[in-house]
Image (spheres, rainbow, N blue to C red):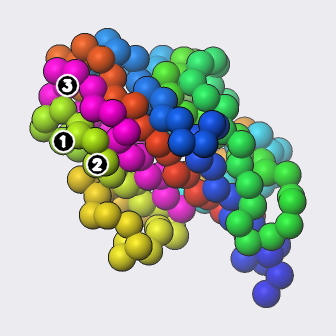
C-alpha cells in the first residue's frame, strides 16, 4: 500500500530540542475560549487530519496548581492567533511531503469560537487533583495511539477516538489549573495522519 492510500503520518515535538515550554499562562486558572495550550490547524483546502495522539510530559512542576483540567475543542475555522511555539512537523512514513497540519504549543492566544465549534469532552476533565509533577505524562488518544508498553504509564489517559480536523479547521486543547501561580513546563509529542 502506498503512503497516499494509508495516509501520511506527521509528528511534531518541541520547537527547540530538549527545551520545554510553559503549557499555559501562569494565571490560567479557568477555561477561556481565547487561550489554549495545543492547537493543530488544518491549512489545507481539501485534506482532513486524523489525530493519532497528543502526549504531554511535564519537565518542571508549576506552583500551587490544583485540579489540572482539560477541554478539547474542534472548530471549522483557524482559531490560532498568536503566541506559543510554532512546531515543525515531519513525515514519519513517507518522503518529504509538505504537511497540511500546522501545530502550535504553549501559551496560545486563540480567536473566539465559531458557531460550529464543538467541545469534545462534554465539560472540563480533571486530569490531576494536585499540581503536575516532573515526568508525569498526559496522553490524549486518537485513532493510532503510541504503543503504551513503550512509554511510562500516563497520569491521565483521555480517549478521544476518531477526531477529524476538517479543511481550514482547528483542534484545540485548553489546559488550566485552579489556584495556579506559575505554569508547568512540558514537552509535547503530537502525531496525526493526513488523507
Residue 39 visible in the shown view = no
Instruction: Tell me which residue sits at (42%, 37%) in the image.
Output: 186
Specify start and end residues of the magenta stretch as a single range.
52-76
Query: Picture coordinates of residue 82 (x, y %)?
Result: 63, 18
Q: Secondary structure at mark 1?
A: strand
Task: Name the main secondary structure of what is drawn in magenta.
Answer: strand
Query: Looking at the image, which residue is at 64% across and 19% down?
Result: 81
- Asked where in the image residue 149 lies, by quadrant, the reply is bottom left
Q: Is residue 22 above or below residue 134?
A: above
Q: CA distance from mark 2 to mark 3?
A: 14 Å
Q: Nearer the viewer, residue 120 or 153?
A: 153
Q: Are marks 2 and 1 in contact (CB under 8 Å)?
A: yes
At x 59% / y 19%, what residue is drawn?
A: 83
Badge 3: residue crowd in 10 Å (few <14, some 14–19, many ≥20): many
Q: Which residue is mark 2?
A: 136
* Residue tagged 1: 128
Q: Classify residue 11 as left or right of residue 116.
A: right
Amino acid at each position: 500500500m502506498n503512503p497516499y492510500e494509508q495516509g501520511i503520518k506527521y509528528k511534531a515535538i518541541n520547537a527547540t530540542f530538549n527545551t520545554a515550554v510553559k503549557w499555559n499562562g501562569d494565571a490560567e486558572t479557568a477555561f477561556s475560549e481565547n487561550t489554549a495550550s495545543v492547537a493543530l490547524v488544518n491549512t489545507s483546502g481539501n485534506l482532513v487530519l486524523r489525530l493519532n495522539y497528543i502526549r504531554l510530559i511535564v519537565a518542571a512542576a508549576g506552583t500551587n496548581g490544583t485540579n489540572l483540567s482539560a477541554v478539547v475543542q474542534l472548530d471549522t475555522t483557524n482559531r490560532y492567533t498568536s503566541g506559543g511555539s510554532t512546531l515543525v512537523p515531519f513525515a514519519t512514513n513517507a518522503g518529504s511531503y509538505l504537511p497540511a497540519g500546522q501545530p502550535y504549543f504553549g501559551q496560545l492566544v486563540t480567536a473566539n469560537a465559531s458557531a460550529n465549534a464543538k467541545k469534545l469532552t462534554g465539560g472540563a476533565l480533571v486530569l490531576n487533583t494536585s499540581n503536575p509533577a516532573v515526568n508525569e505524562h498526559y496522553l490524549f488518544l486518537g485513532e493510532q495511539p503510541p504503543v503504551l508498553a513503550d512509554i511510562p504509564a500516563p497520569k491521565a489517559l483521555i480517549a478521544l477516538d476518531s477526531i477529524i480536523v476538517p479543511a481550514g479547521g482547528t483542534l484545540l486543547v485548553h489546559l488550566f489549573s485552579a489556584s495556579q501561580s506559575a505554569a508547568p513546563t512540558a514537552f509535547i509529542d503530537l502525531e496525526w495522519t493526513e488523507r
